[in-house]
Amino acid sequence: MGGGMLQSLLNMAIRKDSPERPHIDEVSPTAAIAGGEIHIRGRSLAGSGRPTVLLGNVPAPVVIGSDSFVIIRVPEGAVASRLTIGNGGRAAASSRCEIGVQIADNIHAVANPAIDSRGNIYTTFSGSRGQKTPVAVFKIDTNYNVRPFITDLMNATGLAFDQDGVLYISSRHDGIVYRADSEGNLSVYVEGMGIATGIAFDPDGNLFVGDRSGTIFKISRDRQIYVFATLEPSISAYHLAFGPDEYLYVTGPTTSSNDAVYRISPAGETEVFYQGLGRPQGLAFDVEGRLYVSASLGGRKGIVRFEPGKPPEFFLSGPGIAGLAFAPGGALIVATSGALYRLDLGIAGKPLP
């Protein structure tokens, strides 16, 4: 038998024994942080064995692996915008998947981070109820240097900037909302806010404060206090954000696994915006009016996106997400209970009121 014929037979044997090249139909979601799970659907994903999945150059643990469906978990240290899957064949398939870069750790966030006009990020070390921590609020500059910003405050919870770029901080320990100057010096803005948690400003400069025991307060610019709305008490915190419709959107996880996002009209009338989330917490809007909520949807933990006229979308996967905020330049900052992550998604946030 000639050499050419022998090589042809060998090639045929290889083609017969080797699995087909994997084909990816869907990656869901296409953004994640460490610990998140990504679902991959397609054909010939596993071949005759277990699939191999890389995030950039980092191997990802396979939780479930079949020819048509694979679940992977994002490992610590993965930094990538490309997912690749191989099945032992001669070629692999790839798809885009943005993985968050950790920019800070050793924090304790219980709500959204806050971002100033220069891109500096502020986040809390909140501590357990009644715990005095060495640092209450950290400032992370645009080079991701982390330094203490506020130290003398117990149980820092909600953060928000007003129209003048001044940072406000709620304390669920003493029911006070504080105002911080550029050096981190504090003054009392309003007190008597119960278990003060989420805070937000409307376009007119009124401050809204969520007392997680069941009240949303409105504080006018001359510091007059009103009861704006009442809700079911939350087991952790209320989280507030104003939408482009000037309605106040509120989450507050309860003991139910079927929690709601509420929206409250300027007149204080409350309605259910969406019901069916697990432990909804921080929320934010982008410039196109889409709402992002840290919650679980269908048992999957991460961030859920609501786009007008469409069903909710599981947008980002990750455990323990307490809040989120959009930074200048289209980055999304995600806060877990212990770390901050940055994802360059090219999404502009809704401008401050």
Image (cartoon, rainbow, N blue to C red):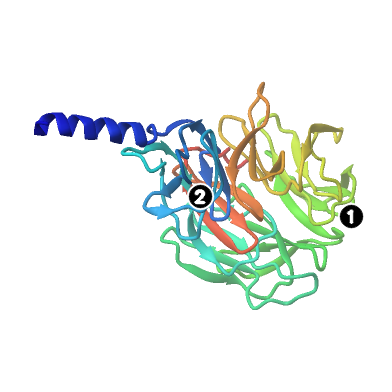
Are there few (<14), some (14-19), or many (20+) residues within 10 Å of tag 1? some
- Residue at image position (14%, 29%) is 5
Residue 204, numbered circle: none
Left or right of 5 on screen, residue 255:
right
Residue 213, numbered circle: 1
Q: Amino acid at mark 2?
A: Ser
Marked residue nearer the N-terminal end (1 or 2): 2
Q: Amino acid at mark 1?
A: Ser
Mark 1 or 2: the one toward you: 1
Q: Is residue 345 visible?
A: yes
Measured as percent of width and height from the top left, residue 280 is found at 74, 46
Q: Residue furthest front?
A: 1
How far apart are the alpha carbons under marks 1 and 2? Answer: 32 Å
Could you say which quadrant of the image residue 249 lies in? top right
Q: Residue furthest top?
A: 309
Q: Is residue 204 visible?
A: no
Measured as percent of width and height from the top left, residue 47 is found at 45, 38
Say above or below: 232 vs 34.
above
- Residue at image position (65%, 61%) is 337
Q: Secondary structure at mark 2?
A: loop
Of residue 320 and residue 72, the one placed in the foreground of this image is: 72
Q: In which quadrant of the rendered image does the C terminus lie?
A: top right
Measured as percent of width and height from the top left, residue 187 is found at 70, 67
Left or right of 214 on screen, residue 82:
left
Residue designated by label 2: 117
